[in-house]
Image (cartoon, rainbow, N blue to C red):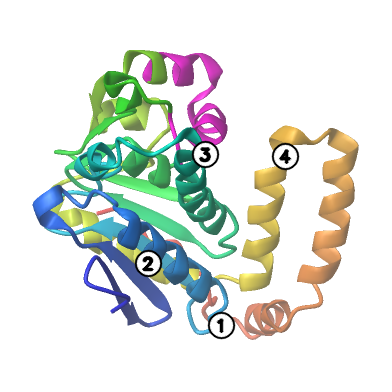
Amino acid sequence: MVGDSVLLARADGVAVLTLNRPAAKNAIDIPTTDALTAALRALRADDEVRAVVLTGAAGDFCAGGDVKGMGEGASRTVEQRRAGMARYAELARALMTLDKPLIAAVDGVAFGAGLSMALYADLVLVSTRARMAMVFHRIGLVPDVGAWFQLPRVVGLQRAKELIYSAREFGAEEAVRMDLALESLAPEALMPRAMALAQSLAGASPTAFGLSKRALAATLQSDFEAMLEMEASSQAIASSSAYFREAIRRFAAKEPAQFRWPKKD
């Protein structure tokens, strides 16, 4: 356990982070934001953790920032508000720099900052009752937790504009159609599928995965020659790893591979 509002469980190389403020639909207040950031940083440094699942308690992912708490800070100056946003920036950095597989299991609401957080996942799974929205403009705010950066890279610039400008709600099927989510599942199948994918990715080479994740994060801001150079350097590192040597040995001995992708039921 990280704290009352963020729960941490571990099993077979997989860490499950659960936002746990069910009375507020897991909205993130200051303590929750700080606890989640600290947990992500600790998991990044933990060699025994090979994959991470991010989810929410009691049938919701995250309703976004704690709007009630925002209202209580109405007397704050612009400078104080900007300093407060540094917490969200640190959370965004912790999500972006996690060099391990991150799977978001989204059930119920994923509004505002909740949806922003899901955008950092390598794989997003949604339940059929998921409800998502970039709600910020409804209350006169702008997207945060790095959504201006992430959303266009996930769904394209024009669709990102539409989702932000309209602040409209959308469901699981549309999330899959616009490539914001990989799969839509029945609520009871959501976490079993997330865990199956996480356990599969936990069996992959951490060296190769980390190198690929960094390259894919850089590719939309890079050019062809730069990516070829990154490819050459990364492959030299990956092919020097103990994981690669063991994979070659297993292949030659006709033994089962360490990494297998689970089929969807």
- The answer to whether the residue labelled 3 contacts the one labelled 2, judged by CB atoms less than 8 Å apart, is no
The image shows residue 49 at horizontal and vertical percentages of: 48, 78
Q: Which mark is residue 135?
A: none
Q: Examine the rendering and report whether any part of residue 13 can be seen.
A: yes
User: Looking at the picture, does residue 47 appear above or below residue 28?
Assistant: below
Choose the circle earlier in sequence order: 1 or 3: 1
Between the C-alphas of marks 1 and 3, the distance is 39 Å
**Which residue is under mark 4?**
219
What residue do we see at 55% from left, 19% from top?
Answer: 157
Graded by Cα atoms within 10 Å as few (under 14), some (14 to 19) or many (20 or more), the crowding at tag 4 reads few
Q: Nearer the viewer, mark 3 or mark 2?
A: 3
Span highlighted in magenta in the image: 143-163
- The answer to whether the residue labelled 4 contacts the one labelled 3, judged by CB atoms less than 8 Å apart, is no
**Residue kind at label 2, given as amino acid type:** Ala
**Which residue is under mark 2?**
35
Q: Quadrant of the N terminus?
A: bottom left
* Secondary structure type for disc 3: helix
In front of the other: 62 or 152: 62
**Which residue is under mark 1?**
47
Q: Nearer the viewer, mark 2 or mark 1?
A: 2
User: Looking at the picture, does residue 247 appear above or below residue 173?
Assistant: below
Between the C-alphas of marks 4 and 2, the distance is 31 Å
Q: Is residue 227 left or right of residue 53?
A: right
Q: Which mark is residue 79?
A: 3
Between the C-alphas of marks 1 and 4, the distance is 26 Å
